[in-house]
Amino acid sequence: MPDDATQSSSVTVDPTDAVRVDAGLIARLRSDLEAADFSVAALDALWGEEAAAALFRGHRVAARRALAPHLAGGEPLAALAAGFVLGLPVPESAMAQALVSLGVRDAMNLGLVERVGGGPSGGQDATVRPLIDLRPYAFSDAAGSGQWWIASDLGELALGCALREDHVLGVGGASHTLSSIMMRDRVRTALDLGTGCGIQALHAARHADLVVATDISARALLFAEFNAVLNGVDNIRFRCGSLFEPVAGESFDHIVSNPPFVITPRVAGVPEYEYRDGGLTGDAIVEAVVRGVRDRLNPGGVAQFLGNWEYRGEQEAFDRVREWLGDEREQGALDAWFVERELQDAPQYAETWIRDGGTRPGTEDFERLTDAWLDDFAARDVRYVGFGYVTLRRPADGVVTLRRYESVESSGSQESGLGAHLARGLRVGRWLASVDDEQLGLATLIAAPDVTEERHYWPGSDDPAALALVQGGGFGRRTAVETGLAGFVGACDGDLPVAVIVGALADLLDVDAADLAAELLPRVRELVFTGVLEPTALD
């Protein structure tokens, strides 16, 4: 466990270039945000469903128009929304009504706004311009529902130009993905590697006694500390440094990370954004995290992070990932579960991340950067880039029981709840490794309540042409099955052992029971692991 005496609770950057962490002033800000009901639900009600959808697509005009009468009417929520969510200048008088406790002058002292026009002391025509993005964030996890306010740098929509290289990102799609897959088992210590604005550290603080949050960016750590103070979370410690350097010699029960995994060319003229670019070539940053986690996990500890991996030449990406993990018989080897959720070809990948930095398609810069990306990929013969989740566990007894690598297409369903599903996979994977086929035959199974069966018929036929089992939860898998396996799953009600069901099916289908068992049991194991079937008891 980290030594509290060695924790640094603050970081130092240019005070004119970032938010300022002042607990007294931040408490007054929190009071104003509460008084204005600065919440997700209130904002959605204020500007309406259509404007909220437009904002999600990156367009603010509908929201601005919806806010106009409320802003003219002096509503504090409208002033906060216009300034800190839409990134628009707001009359100083309107902001003063919204920040009654903090005041505009101290909002300036915190680095939240700057005065534009009206002279140094303001005036009738003075306006204030936001310097940061500050918005409510609602969530729900195993501990219940909640809401925070999250501060970060202004985005492209507010800036109207490409982002600065030390940009501190707010809560984006990857943030939502990682928080949705995060396991919530109670632990003593957690590490958020590459914390950014601190959103994952806040989530981890709900199930860990102590969280250490690290980042190579001092500005990011300042925003992260600001957010922790703003939301009254006091069990996070902040440290500056690269990868695992700030926690050398320490180990943790839970490690989470949204590392700066975006593959970026190492040539002059290509922006290197700190929030997404780890400064290494290709997918080496993900490799470094995979290799480094081993020494930072306590026995039984789990690491979860997002990552990219390259497909080079004719080689499969998971062949390289296996090399990163090493032999499962090595001392300190880890259980591993890699889930690839998306695959992009090299041009698609380049276009996605060039656009993410604020460079618009059709410009000379966009074409120049695309050439740089494709040259970089060609140098390593990269054809595709995969994106997905990595779950690693240090077995408490030192025995590796799970090495799984798979591509799972998105079902289009929400990813919320995947943390519990992944935790279940680790437990069930260990159980499956502990039972041979004879022991599995003695087990009783039950079909999961979220599983349905699809049957497809040719017109006029009484017999199904295709059968599939479909999960309502988890990864929403759709598994094609034949009649025998479908019959087996249908008979799993928790009463009859596996071997008895197989024997009954063999009699019904007039086949040899041993042959049917050899055919079905590997499939049964897979259905148990993926959650279609549940063991009635895990030993």
Image (spheres, grey):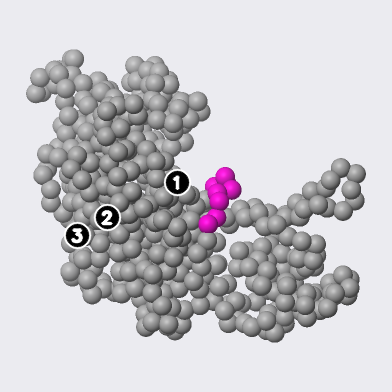
Picture mark count: 3
The residue sitting at 43% across, 72% down in the picture is: 393
Answer yes or no: do the residues labelled 1 and 3 have beta carbons within 8 Å? Answer: no
In the image, what residue occupies the spot 45% across and 73% down?
Answer: 335
What label does residue 281 carry, if any?
Answer: 2
What amino acid type should be assigned to the residue bearing mark 3?
Gly
- Report which residue position mark 3 lands on: 241
Of 102 and 507, nearer the camera is: 507
Res 86 → quadrant? top left
Of the numbered discs 2 and 3, the one sitting upstream in the chain is 3
Q: What is the distance, in whole Å, between disc 1 and disc 2 at their CAs?
A: 18 Å
Residue at image coords 34%, 32%: 85
The residue type indicated by label 1 comes to Gln
- Relative vertical location of residue 62 with respect to residue 24 in this rendering, above or below: above
- Residue range of the region highlighted in magenta in the rendering: 407-414
In percent of width and height, residue 273 lies at 25, 44
Q: Secondary structure at mark 1?
A: strand
Mark 1 → mark 3, Cα distance in angstroms: 31 Å
Horizontal and vertical percent position of residue 394: 41, 75
For residue 453, above or below residue 507: above
Kind of residue indicated by mark 2: Thr
